[in-house]
Image (spheres, coloured by chain):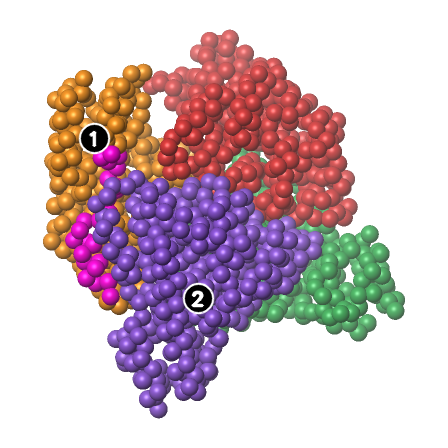
Chain colours: A red, B green, C orange, D purple
Amino acid sequence: MIRFENDYTEGAHERILKRLWETNEEQAPGYGVDSYCEKAKAYIRKACDLEHADIHFLVGGTQTNTTIIASILRPHQGAVAAITGHIAVHETGAIETTGHKVLTLPSDDGKIRADQVKEMYDAHWDDVTHEHMVQPGLVYISHPTENGTTYSKAELEALSKTCRECGLPLVLDGARLGYGLVSKGSDLSLADIASLCDVFYIGGTKIGALCGEAVVITNDALKKDFRYFIKQRGGLLAKGRLLGIQFETLFENGLYFEISSHAVEMAMMIREAFREKGFSFRYDSPTNQQFPILPNAMLSELGKKYSFSFWEKFDSEHSVVRFCTSWATKKENVEMLIEDIKALA
Amino acid sequence: MIRFENDYTEGAHERILKRLWETNEEQAPGYGVDSYCEKAKAYIRKACDLEHADIHFLVGGTQTNTTIIASILRPHQGAVAAITGHIAVHETGAIETTGHKVLTLPSDDGKIRADQVKEMYDAHWDDVTHEHMVQPGLVYISHPTENGTTYSKAELEALSKTCRECGLPLVLDGARLGYGLVSKGSDLSLADIASLCDVFYIGGTKIGALCGEAVVITNDALKKDFRYFIKQRGGLLAKGRLLGIQFETLFENGLYFEISSHAVEMAMMIREAFREKGFSFRYDSPTNQQFPILPNAMLSELGKKYSFSFWEKFDSEHSVVRFCTSWATKKENVEMLIEDIKALA
Amino acid sequence: MIRFENDYTEGAHERILKRLWETNEEQAPGYGVDSYCEKAKAYIRKACDLEHADIHFLVGGTQTNTTIIASILRPHQGAVAAITGHIAVHETGAIETTGHKVLTLPSDDGKIRADQVKEMYDAHWDDVTHEHMVQPGLVYISHPTENGTTYSKAELEALSKTCRECGLPLVLDGARLGYGLVSKGSDLSLADIASLCDVFYIGGTKIGALCGEAVVITNDALKKDFRYFIKQRGGLLAKGRLLGIQFETLFENGLYFEISSHAVEMAMMIREAFREKGFSFRYDSPTNQQFPILPNAMLSELGKKYSFSFWEKFDSEHSVVRFCTSWATKKENVEMLIEDIKALA
Amino acid sequence: MIRFENDYTEGAHERILKRLWETNEEQAPGYGVDSYCEKAKAYIRKACDLEHADIHFLVGGTQTNTTIIASILRPHQGAVAAITGHIAVHETGAIETTGHKVLTLPSDDGKIRADQVKEMYDAHWDDVTHEHMVQPGLVYISHPTENGTTYSKAELEALSKTCRECGLPLVLDGARLGYGLVSKGSDLSLADIASLCDVFYIGGTKIGALCGEAVVITNDALKKDFRYFIKQRGGLLAKGRLLGIQFETLFENGLYFEISSHAVEMAMMIREAFREKGFSFRYDSPTNQQFPILPNAMLSELGKKYSFSFWEKFDSEHSVVRFCTSWATKKENVEMLIEDIKALA
């Protein structure tokens, strides 16, 4: 079985494993104040072109989102997100365990727009009984989204402007950030994101690391006491070096972008194969996740050799499925898949 | 600087790193349902001599304690613990974030006794206004404790009996479990613990792993829906294999016990050196943490070459400090430390 | 200004105030274990035709919903409700403060159907990644709804049957229960509700009391330790007699139903007046809340003499407004309003 | 049975009931924005000699403490309190449900001192691992305390000074505030409290009202969005007038102080009777709660005619009990009790 079901089917990039070997016997202080973490932070600040950013390393996405959001909101506030947002749907109510509601906006492709945020904000404050409702307290977006789509620089600028006018910190979930940054579907750079968002994170788990997400706090007002939150939410690894070493490796010489590019290249090849065969797509994704709409019969046929995810029913005879590539996807497997797509009846 | 400040200064046991290398390119399903996790669970069930136990792998101690406790208690209940317990002191209020109070019992050495639990339980139910107070809902202990001390089989049997009579699940924090199991200071086996506790965890982070704790649920009533809790509390790693591979390695051929023994042996050598020099100890610890009471002047002298932890002020001229060994402690470093202790003025 | 803006503009029914006077100097034990509470409970059990029901008195609706829901759900579960439900919209995220998500179902009139619940339940359990999502844990409905609409006996039977098949407790918010019970738009009796729901509450605040809601727990499994929850959520009044005396008065001789009937009668007169004038209604409400769709110009005209609530914009020239009657509504005021409606241009 | 078991055995002061009668049919807007609330706020501001104070009315003590504390703390912070404090012991973990730990200080009489606060604060910040511990976030005291004791002006000034130096808001629980203010055991005035505390509340339930506590926020930084918190925590009464009318009555002409004086006078008579008979007291209380230490045999003797509370075991033959007076205590009952005390064997 060749797996395209998600972007975390393999271990870590070999350079990371190698570095773990090399440094394994060195003694380091615990809880993320070791020299590896320090170096990784310096590389990331440079990549963000933002010297004053605070960087922290956490373990996984749900933990990271929860920690960030819990650190920002007051108890009567909620997180504005697309109805399809990861925090709204796929984190078993982790945000709610911190006492906060996720305030959802409609979205067909995983993105939300500045005018939607403004409209929700105005609707809240214009209502004379607004004290009976959860107050919008921050805006959460994903880039790329859970549907593989991306924000353009213009779109993110508009969102950022609105958020700043409304006093709502803008939080960006970058679980797959690399795949968005290298995609031809978005003109956003890491420095753009750093300047437009208040907090965001750079996903490692899905892009070459065994685990790990790098939180970047750019807004000074949100930096205070963040390490307490990491500890409280279970993210302060005793062996913080594990995260430091991985991010040092990913950002020392651009490895993060290099392997992201490979994944997107592989995804574009798969997209092209489905497209040539006449299939359409549920979302127009320029990143590593592709969502072709396939006849149900074809699912079991392809499923004999390849694993992929069922996404949703399209109509009585078609389904939307998801094929993911990653930094680890082997080109020969993609080529084999393409041949098999071509050969489909 | 030679580090004895804690038991997580190095990376992982080399056999673990080797196994990560070997399996790195294999594709595995995510979220802990891969074959490595399955094998690790089988080994642990066997080591616990308990075929029906549910095993889950989480990342770190605070997360594990929080997840276990949140899964057991109803909202009006609290966790009974020693006033020195990790959940009471050193988890930044993680238990409280789940809405629960830690109900503390006095303890001088980190341990609590069956009669203390019974007394608190009775005091609650005998009070006519008990509905105005947090109801004891479970009992939490650490073995070894945060002070290096251990429970004997008789003590744990007494606690377990009382807990069962009171309907209070007994939860054991085994962040350093291996060091307790191999210690001559305790006659408790892993199978004993599995039969006497309702939930416990086997610490990996401090005993050979990069990260990871293995939760063992022995009480059928507490098994339901536990994976939801792991996800909700941020512990469901996308690359669950990382944890499975590590615990498979630790439990396949007794590595866990072997490396635990090394650490305790090293600690006993250090203890003996301080003892011979005439120093006494804050706690009588038969495990990998030693708490000698030293003259303050000596702290800076030893501190030039070795790092260790300040624990607490003893009197105006003495301090309690902590020296930790671990699976990774080098014998030559211990021998050098012993020589330096001998040479102290 | 004559107020029709809500159903809590006056104090309490005079019989309640009289009883407070008469009993004022008697000494009673605190926290709801006095003789007034006991009598009130006995009357309510009889009215529900359910001898084994547990009855508790709380202060207000948000507190009551929060306390009930927090007492039922485990941390990974959510409350299924109409998207318009009070807990979903108008309680400032009170449910989320207890750690739980409100899982919303679409609804145009405030009601949800058995098949919607079944569909959401099946969708959850059919999804292979259901552990990544909040598990449905109970179903919350309002009767009458926030839109004045009511459930029929057949509808509630269907909901109850589905809930029991799915293992989901059915919770009914009866903030305006009296107005639903006496309405010609519903054939549901109090005994029907008691037999079909697991927990519900009988609203006092909006029907004759100064404050107070009576919780009725019919499902034995949900009764345990409920008083702890009341205390924890701030609902255990020191002078519990205040609530006991009020509910004793309301249920001793059918006062609750008598004054509910008056309110609904007044509302039907207002409805008829708008209807005769040719206006239509946003919801088909047979209870004390009426939602006519009026030309915007008319709002300011009527607003000179009467207060009512703006509900929502209907189109560029029309608005939906809400007129409420209550147990305290004076017939002469309704007649005056009707004359003024007739006289509208 | 004549009740001295607590200070909430009767209904309300008759002037309050009278005012409820008189205003009952008037129509008022809901949720605390009516004219009664406005007048009550004005009277209280005047009594506090603090024109810029924000005043809010809540229902009961647990709710009030929870709402205040939840509005102030960030998630990683805790409330510093005496180990005997109401929030630490008698609120079923209500503070913990908001995610916060109560950080307790030892106390034998219910009071805490400025130097204890400073010591805890310094201990936290001096610890290099402070991020692993709950950060002190506010200081909570009761005046009078749960043991009937009171703070002097000098003591409160010292606490206030320390709190301000440490950046810790000082919160005062005034459930029995009137009894403290009129006591000869304290030189603190309401204006002193208003100038020294950041938030406090004036208890109504135990001093003449059916229910109700008036929160006074003097620190501008803590005023924002407080009504959201009241609603979220279930304290925003639909018929807010119920609270407004009561506090208007209590503060219009000094009734609050007048009836508080009566209660303390009655308590002093009881104290004197026990003292003359040779009994000593567990706490030196100059307020309405008295804690004589009595031989166990005497408990049942007095208990035939009077109800009072068992407080704690003193030794094998003596118990501490509590006698409470209140605004409603009848002088003839006190005189009868005194005679019976005199007649004790």
Amino acid, disc 2: Val
Q: Bounds of the magenta span?
A: C1-25
Local SS, label 2: loop
Mark sitting on residue A113: none
Residue A102 horizontal/vertical position (percent) = 45, 34
Amino acid, disc 1: Gln
Q: From what the image shows, is residue C305 above or below residue C45?
A: above
Picture residue at 80% right of the left edge, 59% below the top: B334
Q: Is residue D319 left or right of residue B329?
A: left
Q: Chain ID for label 2? A: D
Q: From what the image shows, is residue D321 above or below residue B103?
A: below
Q: Are marks 1 and 2 on the same chain?
A: no
Which residue is label 2 attached to? D182
Total marks placed: 2
Nearer to the camera, C33 or B156: C33
Picture residue at 46% right of the left edge, 46% below the top: D54
Residue A236 horizontal/vertical position (percent) = 63, 45
Mark sitting on residue C290: 1
Q: Are there few (<14), some (14-19), or many (20+) residues within 10 Å of tag 1?
A: many
Nearer to the camera, C258 or D332: D332
Picture residue at 64% right of the left edge, 22% below the top: A192
